[in-house]
Image (spheres, rainbow, N blue to C red):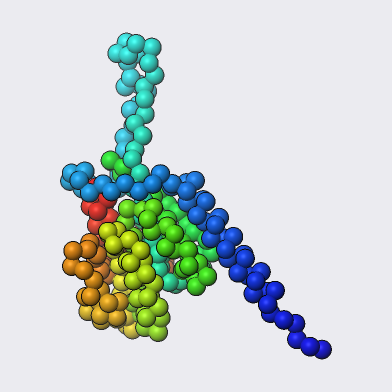
Amino acid sequence: MAPRPLGPLVLALGGAAAVLGSVLFILWKAYFGRGRERRWDRGEAWWGAEPARLPEWDEWDPEDEEDEEPALEELEQREVLVLGLDGSGKSTFLRVLSGKPPLEGHIPTWGFNSVRLPTRNFEVDLLEIGGSQNLRFYWKEFVNEVDVLVFMVDSADRLRMPWARQELHKLLDKDPDLPVVVVANKQDLSEAMSMVELQQELGLQAINSQREIFLLAASIAPAGPGFEDPGTVHIWKLLLELLS
């Protein structure tokens, strides 16, 4: 019996990936899509993640307003895109920031995850897109829609570091003005590359010195309560400073 041709299967898989990419982009536009506006001159950054306090009903005196209901102030949005190869820790990073316990084991993201975190002056929308090879093609479509890019790398994944470098520089070329935070995750592992090694392997020393790009160490554990890693706190504080 002659083997069946793979052509139709390849076409079908390619079509499915194209449809998935289109759906991702439509969902992004529907949920986050307001167009990016640079906001670098908003004043001092606020370093906490405390939700904005809305007025209580018992604090409102109807005599102070003439037949007007109290208006709830709508917070401005800031968008952060979280990318990186599969297994770098993107989903765990989002779960830790949102106060959820990290999932045990490695569960690849097929599609995207999103988290919205309120602060005193604005809301931060973090969008993670899966890092598998068939999804990386669509990363560049989202870069121009956000305020900051977080690119995560597995510091112990020496074999795939050249791939991480290639994908990172594609994104850097897509938007030369976008601030980038490179997170060197899994620094607690014995086989992890040092920060100096990562700077060289990722080609960060060759990037224009005028560009806002940061390399931060982290050890976002796959289990245990969030915010115990000082690197995670540092990343969040830096994000708030860049977004303010």
Q: Residue at x 52, y 70 (%)?
A: 134
Relative depth, front residue between 130 and 60:
130
Residue 207, given in percent of the width and then of the height, sits at 23, 71
Q: Number of marks in the image? A: 0
Residue 13, given in percent of the width and then of the height, sits at 63, 70
Determine whether 54 is above or below 4 in the image: above
Q: Is residue 127 visible?
A: yes
Which quadrant would residue 123 be assigned to in this image? top left
Determine whether 131 is above or below 78 in the image: below
Relative depth, front residue between 56 and 83:
83
Farthest right residue in view:
1
Q: Answer left or right for 164 relative to 107.
A: left
Residue 196, given in percent of the width and then of the height, sits at 22, 79
Q: Answer left or right for 164 relative to 120.
A: right
Q: Is residue 185 visible?
A: no
Q: Residue at x 62, y 65 (%)?
A: 15
Specify the quadrant that holds the N terminus: bottom right
Q: Residue at x 29, y 80 (%)?
A: 201
Which quadrant would residue 83 be assigned to in this image? bottom left
Q: Residue at x 30, y 76 (%)?
A: 202
Determine whether 3 is above or below 11 in the image: below
Residue 187, given in percent of the width and then of the height, sits at 30, 75
